[in-house]
Amino acid sequence: MLELLAGPFDILDLNGDPQAVANPSQVDCFQWDDDLGVMYSEGWLTERLWIIQLDGTATERGYWFARFILDIQDQKLNAYLATNPPFESALYDYQKRSGTYSEQLLSVSGTTPLKDIQVRCDDRFLGVSAAGSQIRAFPLDIDGMSDYITEANLTGTSSAVVRKPAWSRTRNLDVLALAYAGGNIIYYDHVLMQQVAGAAYIGENLGAWYSARLDIWIKLTTARQVEVYAASPRPYAMSNPTAESAPLLGRLTNFTVAVTGDMDEPCPGEVVDWSLHAESVGHLSVSQSKTDADGYALVGYIAPVDSASSEVTIIAEMKY
Amino acid sequence: MFEKIYHSQPVEYISKIEESVFSPPAYYPVPPLDNDGFFTAGHFGGLEAHWRLLHVFIDRVANVFSDNSVRVMMLNRIYHFPGFGVRDYRVDSAQGRYLNDEEGLDGPSPIASAPTLPTSQNFWLLRITDMATKADGQIMASTNQGITWYDVDTDALRLRIDPISITPNDFGAITLKVWMYDPKNQIVIKSKGLSSPTVAELEVFDTSEGVVLIKNIRVSGIPQQIFPEDERRAYVYCQNGLLNLINYMTGEVISTLRSPAPVAFKPIDFQIGHTKFCYDRFYRRMIGVTLTSDDQDTGASTVHAEGWYPVPIAVRIMKPIPLIPIRANRITPYLTKIFGDVGEPIGGVIFKATPTGGNTTIHSITVTDDHGEGIIHAISTIPEEMTMQLWTTI
C-alpha cells in the first residue's frame, strides 16, 4: 500500500466548522487540481464549489454544481470540462479559477447521455465500463450513453458500479492514472490505448488523485477526510541478499535485495544499509544503496584473493 | 479578503430639532421627546429616518479634504408631506469626514423631483425607487411612476427630462433590478430573468442596432449588484458574498474574490447590514456603504463607508505536509501554502518555521510561489515524526 504521509484531516471551513461533504454517488464531483487543490462541487440543491487544501481547509469559491471532466486536449493547461449533473445533457468549458461554466460545447438529448464520459482526449472521450475493467471510447460528437466502443481491457481493477474511478494526469503526458473506489490504482496509456505497467494500492476511498506537480497522492477517505500519500508504497518486506552469480575468490559479485510493500509492490528510493558479519571475509563496495524503480538495492561483494575461510554473511538493513 | 484602507465617520441623519420649530400636520403622530425636550429622529416614527439605501457613487468634486467625495443616496421617511425624500450625503474620499456639516455646504438636501415629466403624472408623488451607475460613471435612476430610467444631474440633483431609451421589455424583463449600462459601447448587462435575479448568470445585450443578446456570463453566485470598474470591466457582487471581476465584452470572468462586506448578506436595501458598492476609479479602490444600527444616544439613523484595495490578503497558512516519507536523518521537503478566503494563492510571502520538538532541525525555507506554496526542508532524528510551527506576518 502507498505510504501515508499526512492525515487524516477533517474538512473544515475557515471558521473551523466541519463541512457537510456530501456522499456523492459519482466521484467526479471531486477533482484534484495542481493549481487550486481539491475542487469539490457540492450537491445539486446546495450548488457550492469548495476548494479543499491538503490539510482539509475548505474555502467557498463558487456556485455551480459541476461534474468535472479531465481535459487533456491541451496538455499545458490543467484544464477541465464540466457536465451539468444530474441531467448530464450538456458539456461546458469550465473556468476553474472562477468556478464558473463558460462556453457550452455540447448538448445531447436523452436520459443522462453524458454520464459515462470522464476524460476528453484529442479525438474522443474516455470512460470505463460498470465493472471497471474496460476502457470505453466515445466519439466527440457523442449522442448517448451507448455510443461507444470498447478500447481496452484492464486488469487489477475493481468495480465501478457505485463510483467510477478517479482519473489523474501523470508525469508522462501519454499516461493517465485511474484510482478505483476499492483502492486499486492502474495506469493507462491513452495514445497506445493500452494498460501500462505499474500498479498501486491506496485503500478504499471516495476519490484519489495523483498530483503530477507534487508527486503525491491525495485521497478522500470514506470517512470524508483528506489523506496524503507518497507515490511509492510503504516498505513491508525485504528479501534475503541474493547473488547474481556464485562468488569467486578475488572477484566482485553483485548481491541484491528486493524491498516490497504489503501487496508485493516494489518500493523504490529506499535506503538499504549493508554490512558484513564480524567473522566474514572480503569487502563490500558500498555501505548504503538505494532501491531502484523495481525495488532492488545492490551491493558489490569483493571476495579476498586468498582466504582460508569461506564464511561470508552479508547483512542488509532498513531503518524507517 | 481585501485590504481595508478607508473608513468613514458614521454618516448621521438629522438627529434633533427643537419643538418650537416643529409644526407637523395635525394628523401626523407626534414623535417622542428625549430627556432634554428635543424631538429625536429614530429609525421609525421619528422626524426623519432612513428608509432605503438607494445608491453610492464617487463624485469628482473637490472638497476641503480631498479631490473626490463618496456620495450616498438615501431614500428617507420624513415627517412632513409627502413623507419621503431622497437625501444626498457626502463623505470625503481621503479621510472619511462627513461633509454635509462643513462650511460651504447646506447639509443634506433632498434630490428634487423632475421638473417636468413627459407625462401627466403628479409632481408631488414622484419618488426615486432605484439608482445605478453607468460604465462612464454617470448616474441613472428610475421612479415609482414607472419602469423608465432617467439620467441624474448629480450637480443639481435633478432627474433629466428625457428618459434613457432603455425599456425592460426589450430585454425580456419586467423590471431592471441588477443591471448596468455602457453607453459608449452600447452594451447592457443584466441579471438573467424577468426581474429579481434567481440564477447565477448575466445576459449581455448589444443595443447599437436594436437589442441583441450577444452572450451569457455565468458568475459565482446569484448577482446582487453590478458596478463598473474600468472600461469594459465590471464587478459583480453576489448574494453568497463572492465578488467577480468580469470583462463583459469578452465574457471572461477575470477573478473571484470574497467581498469585503458585509459579514452576513442582507438582500433588502432597508435592512441593517445591507451594503452597496461602487468602484473608486480615482483612488483605484472599492467603496462599500453599509446601513448600520441607530445611534444609541440620539436614535439617529446611521451608515458608514469603507474602502478597500482589491488585492487578496492571506488568511491561513496550511499545515506542513511532507512530500516524501519521513525517514530518520533524511532531509525531507514539507509543503505549505498561504491562501486567501476563497483559497486564492498568496505569492511572495516570507514565512518562518521553528521546530517545536527536539528531534527536528529546519534546514531551509522558500518564499511562496505563484501557487502560494513554500517548501521547508527539515530533518528529523526520529522516523515518521516531525513537529514544527509555521507563521508569517501579514
Image (cartoon, rainbow, N blue to C red):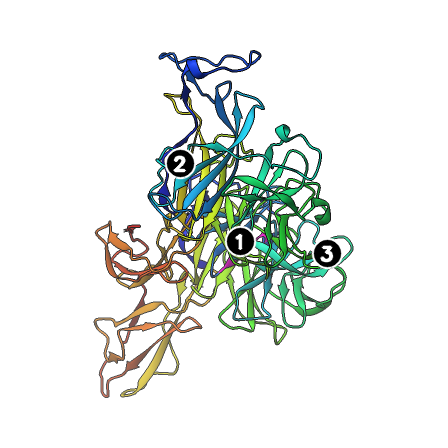
Residue A171 placed where, x, y %?
48, 70
Q: Secondary structure at mark 3?
A: loop
Q: Quadrant of the C terminus of chain A?
A: bottom left
Disc 3 crowd, CA 10 A, few/some/many (<14, 14-19, 20+): few
Q: Which mark is residue B210?
A: 3
Q: Are marks 2 and 1 on the same chain?
A: yes
Residue that mark 1 sits on? B136
Front residue (pair B122, B72): B122
Q: Residues within 10 Å of mark 1 (few under 14, many from 20)?
A: some
Chain to which mark 3 belongs? B
Both marks 3 and 2 on one chain: yes
Q: Decide which of tag 3 and tag 2 comes sooner along the chain.
A: 2
Where, by quadrant of the figure, is residue A155 drawn?
bottom right
Amino acid at pointer 1: Asp
Question: Residue drawn at (56%, 43%), measured in percent from left and top?
Answer: B152
- The residue that label 2 is drawn on is B105
Please report the residue visible at 40 percent of the width from the left and 45 percent of the height from the top. B307
